[in-house]
Image: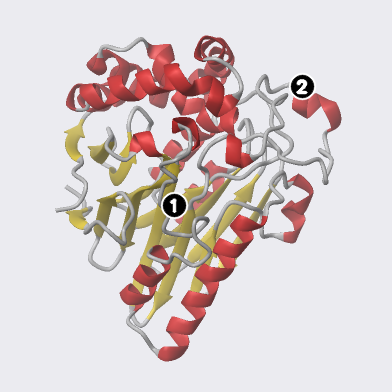
Amino acid sequence: MGIPFTVIEAQGGYRELGRAVGEGAREQIGAAVAFYEEHFAAMAGIDFAEAERQALLYLPFARRYLPQYVDELEGMAEGSGQPFVKLLVPNCAEEFTCPVDADEAPSPHGGAGEAASPARDREAGPESSGGHFCTGVALMAGGRHLVAHNMDWYVVDVDKNVLFDLTTPDGTRIVTIAGVPYLPILGMNSHGIAYVGNSVYSNDNRMGVPNAFVRRWALEASSLEAAAARACLPVRARGSNHLFGDREGRIWDVETSAHGSVLTEYGTAAAHTNHYVAPAMAFYEGYHKEESRRRLADAEARLTAGLERGDDPEAIVDAVLRSHDGAPDSVCGHPDLAAAPADQVMTVASMVCDLDSMELRACAGPPCENPYRTFDVSPR
């Protein structure tokens, strides 16, 4: 049967969308907040009360530049009966839990860029700071147009997934699977744009619009051009990787840091994990561990081999998402149940965006063990 997840359909203003999610996933949101309150010090090096204080420093930027998503999060808080700030902290998760793990490449903006971000004094490695080990893939071959993603995060999220089916005020429909209490930040929209992303460890973080809000905005874009521009919002707090595909067969990848960005156009196939690939972005790299490089090599090798054999494109993508090569640091991730709760990470959700059928296939948990369910993403 697979791990169950809640399906929430809503349309209207952003506060209404958030309120519908909050009401429909009230129990899951409450449990997620309780976990963060108990384990945040182990996850991020500061306790939850301090995280609340620091998260509020980012809020003016989000409210000024992307107020609609502050409204959405406020609606989620209202619907779930939680204080707004307790939902704001998880939506600043990368700002708190993606510290630079080595100073091999100095920040091009010196100390000022680091001092501007209140969480930047924690130099713990990613193994002690969370499960940011996602893998994105795009394949445009054999008449097929597919974009897919495995989301790795804390084990606590695997039973808190929601299938978001939201129609925004301008009629754009977005469909994705994601945990709560987070804003939906990747998936597929009714304009025929598929979007997946990966955490990166940029070394020039600053105060600005949190990454979750930037990615939420990119998810609604009506074209690759608009999506790439939104990913590069000039007042972003930190970097991210943004992998986009459209029904024309275009694959665009945008790597950003707080200050830098590079757009790469791919041909038939692309994959991305949690480090910078574009040479110009190496100066901003804050993650020097090999696990991300191994996952990328595995994904790229499986794409290449499948294409050379003439395999069905969907089977190629599935083989990438279900790969255990290099386990436990594999594309399809499983938890170490002997580890402390804040150190247990896994593939909490997986999705395949089919731009030909305008359908999204989603599962909660590792795709090797859980069947995908199919959801329509066509315009209402």
Q: Nearer the viewer, residue 300 or 341?
A: 341
Q: Position of residue 101 (x, y in %)?
A: 71, 40
Is residue 145 in sight in this rendering?
yes
Secondary structure beneath label 2? helix
* Residue 196, label in figure: 1
Residue 268 visible in image: no
Residue 220 in the image: above or below residue 23: below
| Marks 2 & 1, CB-CB < 8 Å contact | no
Nearest the camera: 276 or 220? 276
Q: Is residue 59 above or below residue 196?
A: above
Please state which amino acid type lies under the numbered disc 2: Ala
Q: Position of residue 326 (x, y in %)?
A: 53, 64
Secondary structure at badge 1 equals strand
Compare residues 299 and 170 and report the one nearer the observer.
Answer: 299
In-image side of 318 versus 300 (left or right): left
Residue type at mark 1 is Val
**Between 137 and 216, which is closer to the camera in this rendering?**
137
**Left or right placement of residue 162 versus residue 247 in this view:** left
> Which residue carries the number 2 mark?
115
Q: Residue furthest left?
A: 1
Q: CA distance from mark 2 to mark 1?
A: 30 Å
For image coordinates 75% across by 53% down, the residue present is: 282
Residue 165: assigned label: none
